[in-house]
C-alpha cells in the first residue's frame, strides 16, 4: 500500500501536536516510542491532527480505516487470487508502514472488534512485530515506525479490551477549540468568505453553542463553504438556508 498524500493543515491549540510528537520520541535505544490514542467528538479534527503531526516529522503517512468488519488478516496480509490462478499475498497499510518505517494512523480504532485488535497486541508492546497466520511469517517493524489511533467517543463503537487500552497510551483527549481558533480554521480552510457573512455566521454559532448544539469544526467548515456558494448563487438569506441544511436543529439529538 502506498502512503497517503494529505496536505490538510492543522492549527494547533492546547499543544496537542506537541503531545503527540512527544509520545513518538525515542530518547535512547531502550526507550520505546508510545502509541497514543486521540479521542474526541466526530468532526473535531483528530485525523487531521495525526496526519499533520506525522507530516511535520517528514514521515510518510499510512492510514488504516477500521470498521466493524475488519478481520485480523485485513490488518496484516491477505491472499488474493491473480489472473493466472496464482495466490499473491498483499500487505495492508499497517504492514507497509511497519516495513518502510512510516507513521500509521489507525483511524476510528474503536469501530474494530476485539479479535482484530488481538492480532496487533505484539506490535503495540516491546515486541514490535505482527504475525501473519495466512502467510506463515513474522513481520518486524522498522525502528522509525510509529503509530497512533483515533477514536470517537460516541456510543456506536466497541469498548476496547483492557490489555489493548493499556498498550494505547497516552490518551490525548481533544476538546473543541476556542472561538478564536475556530475563526482561524475557517479563514485557513475557506478563504474568500465575505467578512460580513463570517461575522453573522459566528454570532449564530455562538448563540447555538449557548443552547448546547455541539456543532463540530467540520460542521462549521461545511456551513461556511455552503453559505458562500449560496451567496455566490444570489440566494436569498444564504446563511439561514445553509444553517437549516447543514446544522442540526436545536434540541435534536444526533447530527445527520
Ligand atoms: N485545528 C484545526 N486546524 C485545521 N483544520 C481543522 C482543525 N480542526 C478541524 N479541522 C478541519 O475540520 C475537518 C474535520 O476534521 P477531521 O476529519 O480530522 O475530524 P475527525 O475528528 O477525524 O472526524 P471523525 O470523527 O468524523 O473522523 C477537516 O476539514 C479539518 O481540516
Ligand atoms: Mg477522522
Image: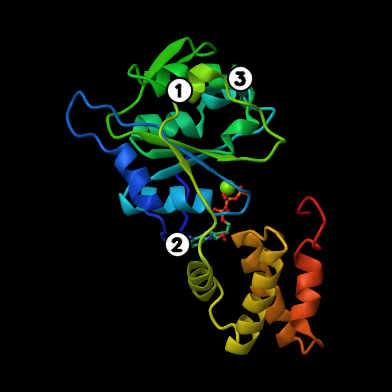
Residue 196 appears left or right of 191: right
Q: Secondary structure at mark 2?
A: loop
Residue pictured at 82% horizontal, 88% vertical: 236
At label 1, counting other C-alpha atoms closer than 10 Å, the crowd grade (few under 14, some 14-19, many 20 or more) is some
**Whether the residue under disc 2 has CB within 8 Å of ligand 1:** yes
From the top left corner, tell me how far across and down residue 118 is, in percent.
54, 16
The answer to whether marks 3 and 1 mark residues whose Cβ atoms lie closer than 8 Å is no
Q: Quadrant of residue 139?
A: top left
Residue linked to disc 2: 9
The answer to whether marks 3 and 2 mark residues whose Cβ atoms lie closer than 8 Å is no
Residue linked to disc 1: 166
Q: Quadrant of residue 142?
A: top left
Is residue 58 among what the camera can see? yes
Q: CA distance from mark 3 to mark 1?
A: 14 Å
Q: Secondary structure at mark 3?
A: helix
Which badge, 3 or 2, comes first in the chain's sequence?
Answer: 2
From the top left corner, tell me how far across and down residue 49 is, in percent.
46, 52
At label 3, counting other C-alpha atoms closer than 10 Å, the crowd grade (few under 14, some 14-19, many 20 or more) is some
Residue pictured at 58% horizontal, 87% vertical: 195
Question: Looking at the image, how many numbered discs can be counted on the residues?
Answer: 3
Q: Secondary structure at mark 1?
A: loop
Residue linked to disc 3: 114
Residue pictured at 76% horizontal, 86% vertical: 233
At label 2, counting other C-alpha atoms closer than 10 Å, the crowd grade (few under 14, some 14-19, many 20 or more) is some
Amino acid at each position: 500500500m502506498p502512503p497517503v498524500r494529505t496536505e490538510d493543515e492543522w492549527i494547533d491549540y492546547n499543544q496537542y501536536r506537541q503531545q503527540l510528537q512527544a509520545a513518538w520520541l525515542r530518547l535512547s535505544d531502550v526507550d520505546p516510542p508510545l502509541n497514543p490514542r486521540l479521542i474526541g467528538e466526530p468532526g473535531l479534527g483528530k485525523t487531521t491532527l495525526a496526519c499533520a503531526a506525522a507530516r511535520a516529522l517528514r514521515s510518510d503517512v499510512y492510514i488504516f480505516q477500521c470498521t466493524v468488519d475488519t478481520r485480523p488478516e485485513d490488518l496484516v496480509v491477505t491472499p488474493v487470487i491473480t489472473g493466472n490462478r496464482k495466490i499473491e499475498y498483499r500487505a495492508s497499510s499497517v504492514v507497509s508502514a511497519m516495513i518502510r518505517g512510516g507513521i500509521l494512523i489507525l483511524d476510528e480504532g474503536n469501530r474494530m472488534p476485539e479479535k482484530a485488535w488481538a492480532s496487533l497486541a505484539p506490535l503495540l508492546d516491546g515486541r514490535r512485530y505482527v504475525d501473519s497466520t495466512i502467510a506463515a511469517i513474522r513481520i518486524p517493524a522498522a525502528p522509525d515506525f510509529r503509530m497512533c489511533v483515533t477514536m470517537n467517543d460516541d456510543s456506536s463503537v466497541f469498548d476496547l479490551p483492557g490489555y489493548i487500552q493499556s498498550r494505547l497510551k497516552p490518551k490525548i483527549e481533544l476538546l473543541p477549540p476556542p472561538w478564536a481558533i475556530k475563526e482561524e480554521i475557517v479563514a485557513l480552510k475557506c478563504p474568500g468568505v465575505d467578512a460580513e457573512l463570517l461575522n453573522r455566521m459566528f454570532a449564530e454559532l455562538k448563540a447555538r453553542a449557548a443552547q448546547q448544539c455541539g456543532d463540530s469544526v467540520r460542521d462549521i467548515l461545511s456551513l461556511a463553504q455552503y453559505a458562500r456558494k449560496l451567496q455566490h448563487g444570489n440566494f436569498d438569506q444564504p446563511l439561514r438556508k445553509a444553517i437549516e441544511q447543514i446544522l442540526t436543529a436545536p434540541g435534536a439529538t444526533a447530527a445527520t
